[in-house]
Image: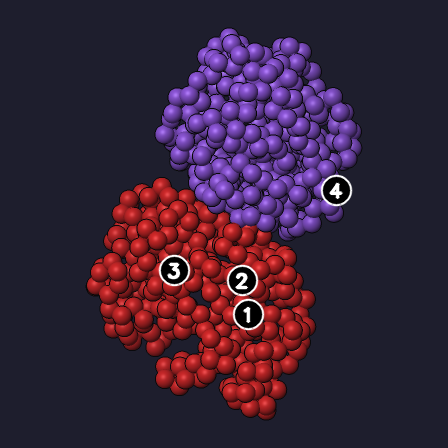
Chain colours: A red, B purple
Amino acid sequence: MHAVVIGGGGFVGSRLARELVKVGSLAQGEISKITLMDRAFPEELLHVEHFDFVVGDFSEESVIRPVLEQRPELVFHLAAVVSGEAEKNFDLGMKVNLHGSLQLLEICRQLAHQPRLIFASSCGVFGGDVTQVVADTTAPKPRSSYGTQKAIVELLINDYSRRGFVDGRTLRLPTITVRPGKPNAATSSFLSGIIREPLNGVSATYPVSEDSAFWLLSPKRVVQNFIHAANLSSDCLGDDRIITLPGITASVGDLLSSLRNVAGTEIAERAVYEPDAFLQGIVLTWPPNFDPKRALELGFVKDTSTEEIIRNYIEEETISGF
Amino acid sequence: MHAVVIGGGGFVGSRLARELVKVGSLAQGEISKITLMDRAFPEELLHVEHFDFVVGDFSEESVIRPVLEQRPELVFHLAAVVSGEAEKNFDLGMKVNLHGSLQLLEICRQLAHQPRLIFASSCGVFGGDVTQVVADTTAPKPRSSYGTQKAIVELLINDYSRRGFVDGRTLRLPTITVRPGKPNAATSSFLSGIIREPLNGVSATYPVSEDSAFWLLSPKRVVQNFIHAANLSSDCLGDDRIITLPGITASVGDLLSSLRNVAGTEIAERAVYEPDAFLQGIVLTWPPNFDPKRALELGFVKDTSTEEIIRNYIEEETISGF
């Protein structure tokens, strides 16, 4: 079975790729080939055996078509222009997040091999009323171009699946924290930064007040959930292929107090409040409370506490050397 | 003030165009010019003064761009490949309903004149669980490609409005009945046919059982609602430009019993049940019960009964000579 990870050079994508090697087989069969596609790959990933690398922008037909023409049975689609970038560069977000994804679906339709397609959407499709508890039946009301583009691709994947062009599954990702490495242009980047930088002895800022709450999931659990989505039979899913992933609701204050419990006050105090109107204008429109009933019934998983998230991060960083 | 009606040759579009002539001015000012765009126009409309006609497919850039370059202050967008056709011809539906609408938005963005744009969406964006009562916060779960394409354009119009590229308003239309003229490829066409044909002395069929219920609005009220949408200030609307129009819930049996009350048993008996699996597969996924709270608060209107709808139809047909 041939699996492709689009966005396989990214943090979640490369972690998922390593997990595919580890599990070896999925519901569709033994994994005989793994192709990773991205604009660039971290150096250490290039030394891992088992992977074919395709360097390029997936939204270019010349990059994506040859890979899909190999008729992979399983495609993970995690490539995106992140939220902050898509807000600042509208054309780029539309080209990659909307037209790139639509082109991917169209090529699958032409090839008619009906791959299982797992799409990384985002809880950023929700916006506006932050007091609501988001249920599986709640309408996406994005307040960002990124959220809009993700919500559109969700609808396309449902229709392309209903028509039998692909066997799609859309996972709406909570904010993933703690991400290792450097800050990126995701508007939620600070939710990793305020844990990661203090642990690395560096100061960090957060652009919203301490009581601002978010819907969070760890890298470990999101990878587990991607694997689970690939294993689920389409009979479980019916016509609605959209799954709002479970998570935990935590405020910036909760994260800092967990960091204090795990690593001490001195480290936790390295994160300081520095208001940012642009970031507030996006992240404070994300509702932090969800009722992910369907996902839990289907067996998707979440973390048990923010302390667990931080402890796992510390442990994994030592082990993996990221 | 220059108003454009895309789809102005269609039934609702041409009726709206005549109403624009009648009202003469709107919140944006006196209407000095009305351009109607469509692939074809009914003969009688071509004899009406006041209108500029543009014959062509709005999804062709060569057709739409020159009209938008006149920088109309108000654009009604009612053109679409209807539900049955979009389900049978996927490429055509995508080209017109999705790409045509996206192109329209992109040209407005390039021209930067921020027209007020009223888009005709459809309650066909909802599907699946027909027992639900659809609220303003309910997620669209379309079970047709038409509904998917409409739901996507709704999201685009919200984002293009939020960013100030257009001043958009999306109206989700209930099934419009009674439509005069001939049956069309809309999957809901029978909901007009079972009233219209018997009144014209012709037999008609309905593809679903008598207890199948639908969310209905008359041509008269939908035109009133388009005018109202054009007059509303954007302050009333905020970032969410989507309005699920009010309507009434009625079954096929309700419609036939109202027809009996208005026109007699002999006429009502000209409509007979003839099951059709293709039509059932779409129209029976449309939830018939709505709670259109926001629309009612914003002053949008509905009919009072199916008998009123039928009486209005009889009266209007005599007057207008359609």
Q: Earlier in the sequence, mark 3 or mark 2?
A: 2
Mark number displayed over residue B233? 4
- The local crowd at label 3, few if under 14, some if 14 to 19, many if 20 or more residues have their Cα within 10 Å, is some
Q: CA distance from mark 3 to mark 1?
A: 20 Å
Q: Secondary structure at mark 4?
A: loop
Mark number displayed over residue B188? none
For the residues beneath circles 4 and 2, the answer to whether they share a chain is no
Do residues under tags 2 and 1 come within 8 Å of each other at their CB atoms? yes
Q: Secondary structure at mark 2?
A: strand
What's the chain of the residue with tag 2?
A: A
Instruction: State the residue at coordinates (64%, 17%).
Output: B311
Mark number displayed over residue A290? 2
Q: What's the residue type where badge 3 is placed?
A: Leu
Q: Is residue A160 visible?
A: no
What's the chain of the residue with tag 1?
A: A
Q: What's the residue type where badge 4 is placed?
A: Ser
Q: Residue A225 in the image: state x and y as whole percent.
A: 38, 65
Q: Which residue is mark 3?
A: A298
Q: In this image, A119 relative to B52: left or right?
A: left
- The local crowd at label 2, few if under 14, some if 14 to 19, many if 20 or more residues have their Cα within 10 Å, is many
Q: Residue B277 in the image: state x and y as whole percent.
A: 36, 30
Q: Secondary structure at mark 1?
A: strand
Nearer-the-camera pick, B237 or A40 = B237
Quadrant of res B87:
top left
Q: Is residue A263 visible?
A: yes
Q: Is residue B322 above or below residue A109?
A: above
Q: CA distance from mark 3 to mark 4?
A: 44 Å
Q: CA distance from mark 4 to mark 2?
A: 33 Å
